[in-house]
Amino acid sequence: MGRGGKRGGRGGRGGKNSGHVSGERQSYKRFEDLRRDNDNFRKYYMAQKIVSDEEFPELMESMRSVLPTNFRITGSRQQAIDIREQIINEFVPYIKETSIEGAEIEPPHPLEWYPNNFGWQFMIPRVALKKSKELSKFHSFLVTETEVGNISRQEAVSMVPPLFLDVQPSHYVLDMCAAPGSKTAQLIEALHSDVEVGKTPEGLVIANDADYKRACMLVHQMNRLNSPNIIVTNHSGERFPNIYRQDAQGKRLSRDIVQFDRILCDVPCSGDGTTRKNVRVWEKWRPDDAYGLNPIQSKILQRAAYLLKTGGRMVYSTCSLNPIENEAVVAHVLDHFEGALRLVDVSDQLPALKRRPGLATWKVMTRDGTLHDEYESIPVDEAGNGRRKYMEKFFPLSSERMQELNIDRCMRIYSHMQNTGGFFVAVLEKVAPISVDEKRKAAAEEAAAEEATFAVPVEAIKSDDVTAMDTDCAEGAANPAPKRLADEAEASDSGAAEADSDAADTKRAKIDSAEKVGDRAERQPYLPDNPREDPALVENPFVFLEPSHSDLKSILEYYGIKDSMSRNGFLSRIENGAFRSVYHVSDSVRELMELAGQRLRVVNTGIRVFSRNSVKDAPCSFRLVCEGVPQLLPHLPDRYVIDVSFRDLKTLLDEVNPLLTALSDECHERLKSVPASSSVVVVYDPAKHENDEEKPFTRMTAQLMVPCWRGQVSLSVHMDKNQLCSLIHRVLGRSVDRNTVGGYKLDNNKTAATRSAAETPVLAGNGDISDAE
């Protein structure tokens, strides 16, 4: 959803939608002065019959109102439960007792349709929440936990698409238009569901976006989730590259590409369902917005169909109400593939989510404001012009065909139904192979299975028969070939993909040039099975480090990393023969990256687990990194894992660089075995210390893993300011200024805490870290 900075990407609106319109915007002195209406919008959507005439005023009124604050609890399941209980037990009672100008405030409440009460809604708008002194404590909590990654500030309907993908830990998942990453985060959480902390699932998630800057924003989002199973890439969605498998000798199998179990196509759109938070959409809305985006949206969905495994599932979604961006795209792509894709009936899933069925009929509005039911009704002038900026696929198929496609299985979510924004969701399943290569591979696998079961010789199936089945399929309704498939495959083999490269250029599909985009897409065929590749990124690529690499070997030996942690997943960006940080990825990510080579424009991947420190004469040149601790912890020897009581944890959070003698005798004794000027992980397990006299402010069940730096005579917490703020609040119940936390003076550019000038100077020669980055 949202407009793309490039094709297959997103842009604007300060997040996902820019609400971009042509012409200069009118300047307003106040936000309240923005006009929340548009005559063309009214005329267009009343004609579409998206709701009844009686219901339309209610829809319009809701679209003019300000959106409430929505957020989602993220992270591992046990940690998410702790955050949820903190909201229920601390903030809900607090807000119930709070009033603004004498008026009571409705506290936040769970979204009734979101699983496990992890989705929440607060009726106070975000702007009002930010400005309210009475709610500053809750606002500070949301900001801090969002920065840490425990909470995602996400519009309610934006949470819907990933829920219908049903991602499992073994799945290969592709998010084709991922930025800014809130939906991608849901996919990663689903991938890690039911997987123990420190262990890696078999699957992976590729988060792709066409705009490089927005892809970098994805990196910030993904770093908070601490997953070794994520790759952030930068490709135009309709040109996401083929990744070819290899044979036993390492030779590329040119007709065997990596396909995905699940694909999310949350495509660039006009965003007219976001008027509640993006008021600028009202200014100069016009139907032409959709005409320039429809070809790109169709290409992305077609490309996804080729990348999806047979039996796999994908979701197509937009934050637009326009049927030309929604049902028109889905219907014509389904029709193009002639039964290889089908819409899934998900009416029994998320039953509390209110929705409406997809539209089977709609109209197209020309620039003069005339509405047309069919393409032929658009007039042409004497020169034969008039239809150039309009396409037949903007219109519905025949009523019989729309019924055959079960277009009513698409979902429309309107703002007045559950106090949300507007959204469109379609869930599709691939029920048959599409490309010639897919069919050939499926036939070979079927033959091999028959040979194993019934001893039918593979030689009995001739290659000519397979080819004939691939291209004809005249009788096979259960395994049909898409329209023009044989011609497209032949063109692809002959190099026509290069000749048609203009059809998949990297320029943004600007709304102002909608007629040009539509005309070009109509005249030039798109080959979604083999699109032109994007050029490689001009930056240092990731390089996998062999266990024998001198620096990596010294790190692994010093910290005693157990063999249970895969040695194949360490990598780094090397510049001038050196590197600052070491990342770790799952085996599945390494395998995919090695198969892809330079074809995949990798922006970032994995978890940062080690980073160079700046302490002279340290026994190891690298320290543990906070985000990598959950991944490393199960593989660290007991020497570097210090179990502490609540009293010791409180001391670490209350004091700056507390002396080792300030800790309990047991903790002090354990720390003696850790060399000075070294990283160590302090672990507080509530289950082990449930009989402690002192308890955390918030009831916790999940382990707390706190990376620390063991100096000569002291121990200091080694976290960034947001993580430290979150930890202090959860453990001590104290809201703190993020610029000065617990006596630490925190520099925004540092990940380590440094002692405030008002505090006692650092003990000379103690080796405590002061500038880790």
Image: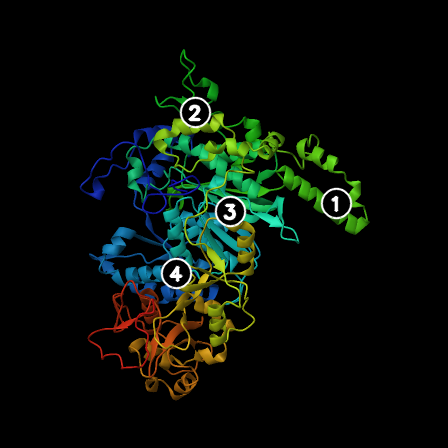
Which label belongs to residue 599? 3
Say which of marks 1 and 2 sits in front.
1
Question: What element does badge 2 sit on?
Answer: loop
Q: Using residue 262 as the reference point, say whether residue 611 is left or right of it.
A: left
Q: Earlier in the sequence, mark 3 or mark 1?
A: 1
Q: Which mark is residue 390?
A: 2
Question: How far apart are the two marked residues, 4 and 1, measured between alpha carbons?
Answer: 49 Å
Residue 30 in the image: state x and y as whole percent: 19, 43
Q: Secondary structure at mark 3?
A: helix
Q: Residues within 10 Å of mark 4 (few under 14, many from 20)?
A: many
Q: 178 above or below 691? A: above
Where disc 4 sits, the SS reads: loop
322 vs 426, left or right, is: left
Q: CA distance from mark 3 to mark 4?
A: 31 Å
Q: Position of residue 34 (x, y in %)?
A: 24, 39
Sequence-first tag of 2 and 3:
2
Distance, label 3 to label 1, CA atoms, is: 32 Å
Residue at position x 27%, y 82% from top?
764
* Quadrant the N terminus occupies: top left
